[in-house]
Image (cartoon, rainbow, N blue to C red):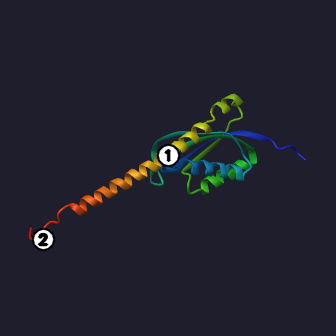
């Protein structure tokens, strides 16, 4: 029986800007795609949110996630197929990264910062929703208290 050789890869996954509303779901989606093919995630971070050079499926902005992972070379086509079939992902690019030193891959890990951002966005979302509810109510109450325009003009 031959020994299975695990290669190191770099993956850049592009989600629509709407993914910022639920970053955890995007991270879980990337983990799901990779784990189904037996990949081991070494490093993951939100790379950037930026304007796209051209519109993709009606999206003008996107969120990028940079992931370093180990996987059998034969499984890469399966990962790419899953990325192409995903309705959540706009694009994915996977490159071999065996030339990168382990220290550089570990330095690129931003999972703790990403967890902090997810937690922060979750905390911001609750008060913001309450503020929106208040502003909607105040607009409705203004309509109720405003005099009706007369039909005679």
Image location (x, y in percent) of residue 102: 71, 31
Gap between marks 1 and 2 measured at Cα: 48 Å
The residue at the point 30 percent across, 56 percent down is 138
Image location (x, y in percent) of residue 33: 66, 52
The residue at the point 53 percent across, 49 percent down is 15
Closer-to-camera residue (88/77): 88
- The label nearer to you, 1 versus 2, is 1
Image location (x, y in percent) of residue 87: 56, 57
Residue 106 in view in this figure: yes
Closer-to-camera residue (56/104): 104
Q: Which label is found at residue 57?
A: none
The residue at the point 62 percent across, 52 percent down is 83
Which SS class for mark 2? loop
Quarter placement of the C terminus: bottom left
Q: Which label is found at residue 151?
A: 2
Which SS class for mark 1? helix
The residue at the point 12 percent across, 68 percent down is 150
State the residue position of label 1. 123
Q: Residue furthest left?
A: 152
Above-or-below relation of 47 to 20: above
Asked which quadrant contains residue 46, the reply is top right
Q: Earlier in the sequence, mark 1 or mark 2?
A: 1
Left or right for 53, reference 41: left
Image location (x, y in percent) of residue 81: 65, 54
Left or right for 6, reference 142: right
Dot 2 alpha-carbon crowd within 10 angstroms: few under 14, some 14 to 19, many 20 or more: few
Q: Residue furthest right?
A: 1
Residue 101 in view in this figure: no
């Amino acid at each position: 029986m031959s020994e299975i050789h695990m290669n190191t890869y770099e993956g850049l996954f592009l989600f629509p800007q709407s993914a910022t509303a639920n970053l955890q779901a995007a991270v879980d989606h990337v983990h799901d795609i990779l784990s189904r093919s037996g990949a081991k995630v070494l490093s993951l971070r939100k790379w950037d949110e930026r304007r796209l050079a051209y519109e993709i499926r009606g999206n003008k902005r996107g969120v990028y996630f940079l992931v370093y992972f180990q996987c059998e070379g034969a499984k890469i086509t399966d990962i790419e197929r899953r990325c192409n079939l995903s309705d959540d992902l706009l694009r994915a690019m996977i490159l071999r990264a065996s030339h990168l030193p382990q220290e550089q891959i570990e330095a690129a890990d931003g999972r703790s910062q990403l967890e902090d951002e997810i937690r922060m966005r979750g905390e911001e979302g609750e008060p913001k929703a309450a503020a929106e509810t208040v502003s909607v109510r105040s607009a409705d109450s203004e309509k109720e208290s405003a005099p009706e325009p007369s039909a005679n003009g």
